[in-house]
Every structure is written in C-alpha cells, then in structure tokens.
C-alpha cells in the first residue's frame, strides 16, 4: 500500500517517517521523498494515528488525489534540482511528464490552479535556492554554477537571481561572508 506525505523533502524527514511507521507496527518497503510503501494495508485507527504523529512533526498525510499529484510534482522537481548529480538534458516539462506518466499540460493546469504559481516558477525558485547553496559552499564560481544548473549564460542566472532575491549573486555572497565573519568574531 502506498501513502503520500506532504512536506517530506529531506533525509531527516525520511528517518522520522520510518520511526513513526515502526512505532505503529507497520513494515515499510520503500520510504522515499513524499511517498511510503508499506507491506500491509493500514486500518483506520493506524491511519488516524499516523496522521496525528506526522502533523506533530510538520508533515501531512495526504488523502486528496489532487494534493497527492501536486506533491508528486513538487518532489520530482526537488529531487531533480537538489539531489540529482546532473539536471536532465531534456526540457523540464518532458522530464516531469515522463517521471509522472501524465500529460504536462494537465499537470501544469492542476499545479497552477492549486498552488497559485506555475511549475516553471516553482522550478526557478528552487534553482535560485540551489544557487544560494552553491554560492555559500564557495566550491564553484558563478560560471560553473550557471553551467551546472543549465542557464544559458551567467547574465541570465544573475538576472533571475536578482529578480527573485532582490540582490545580485556577488552581493549575496559578500553579505553571507560578512555575516559569517561577524559570527566567528563573537
């Protein structure tokens, strides 16, 4: 039986979900971002208790089919941008459609209707978060980050970064370094 869990976006979340399932005597086959497959069928009492336990940890057991689909879309994007070694070489729309086995127009319409933003904007927001992370690691320069995240140019990356954050990437990096320096002097 598959269960879908909202806000499950990290390894820590996966560990917590495993712990909650074990407490309820449920045996899991797979615990992945946003999805759990358990060996047995879950009864209503276990379902309600799992729902309560997950809510206390900031996670939400999903029942609505549209909410489940939205969460699947978000998890594909998060996995693609934050955890995959390389971004797909195909268009993101083709990649998402292929991963979820749905027409992209259908996915896009539902996502926009429920979330109030487009899938493309959601992807851009996550790419900018990834840029912030990579800037802080200081292992890659802006040109390398631009290449890694499939931007057409450094200028395109910089413009998108400034549009989302209000700061240029270089100013953002200096701001973080200055803050880090101030914390080290305490």
Image (cartoon, helix red, strand yellow):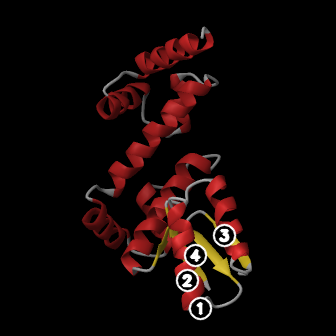
Pointer 2 with pointer 4, Cβ within 8 A: yes
The residue at which mark 3 appears reads as 20
Q: Secondary structure at mark 4?
A: helix
The residue at which mark 2 appears reads as 47
For the point 42% across and 35% down, which residue is it? 152
Image spot of residue 35 (x, y percent): 58, 71
For the point 49% across and 31% down, which residue is it? 132
Pointer 4 with pointer 3, Cβ within 8 A: yes
Pointer 1 with pointer 4, Cβ within 8 A: no
The residue at which mark 1 appears reads as 43
The residue at which mark 4 appears reads as 50
Residue 46 can be seen, yes or no? yes
Q: CA distance from mark 3 to mark 2?
A: 11 Å
- Tell which circle, 3 or 1, labels the residue nearer the N-terminal end: 3
Q: CA distance from mark 2 to mark 4?
A: 5 Å
* Residue 134 lies in quadrant: top right
From the image, which quarter does the N terminus lie in? bottom right
Residue 112: assigned label: none
Q: Residues within 10 Å of mark 2 (few under 14, many from 20)?
A: some
Figure check: 55 above or below 89 = below
Q: Secondary structure at mark 3?
A: helix
Q: CA distance from mark 3 to mark 1?
A: 15 Å
- Tell which circle, 1 or 4, labels the residue nearer the N-terminal end: 1
Q: CA distance from mark 2 to mark 1?
A: 6 Å
* Residue 14 lies in quadrant: bottom right
Q: Is residue 181 left or right of residue 129?
A: right
Figure check: 138 above or below 156 = above
């Amino acid at each position: 039986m598959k269960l879908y869990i909202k806000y499950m976006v990290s390894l820590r979340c996966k560990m917590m979900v495993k712990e909650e399932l074990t407490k309820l005597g449920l045996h899991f086959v797979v615990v992945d971002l946003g999805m759990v497959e358990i060996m047995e069928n879950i009864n209503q009492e276990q379902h309600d208790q799992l729902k309560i336990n997950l809510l206390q940890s900031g996670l939400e057991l999903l029942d609505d089919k549209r909410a489940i689909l939205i969460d699947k879309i978000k998890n594909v994007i998060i996995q693609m941008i934050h955890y995959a070694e390389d971004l797909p070489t195909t268009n993101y729309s083709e990649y998402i459609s292929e991963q979820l086995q749905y027409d992209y127009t259908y996915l896009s319409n539902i996502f926009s209707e429920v979330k109030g933003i487009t899938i493309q904007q959601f992807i851009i927001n996550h790419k900018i978060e990834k840029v912030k992370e990579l800037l802080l690691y200081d292992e890659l320069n802006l040109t390398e980050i631009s290449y890694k995240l499939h931007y057409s140019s450094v200028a395109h990356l910089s413009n998108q970064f400034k549009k989302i954050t209000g700061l240029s990437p270089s100013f953002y990096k200096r701001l973080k370094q200055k803050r880090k320096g101030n914390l080290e002097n305490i």
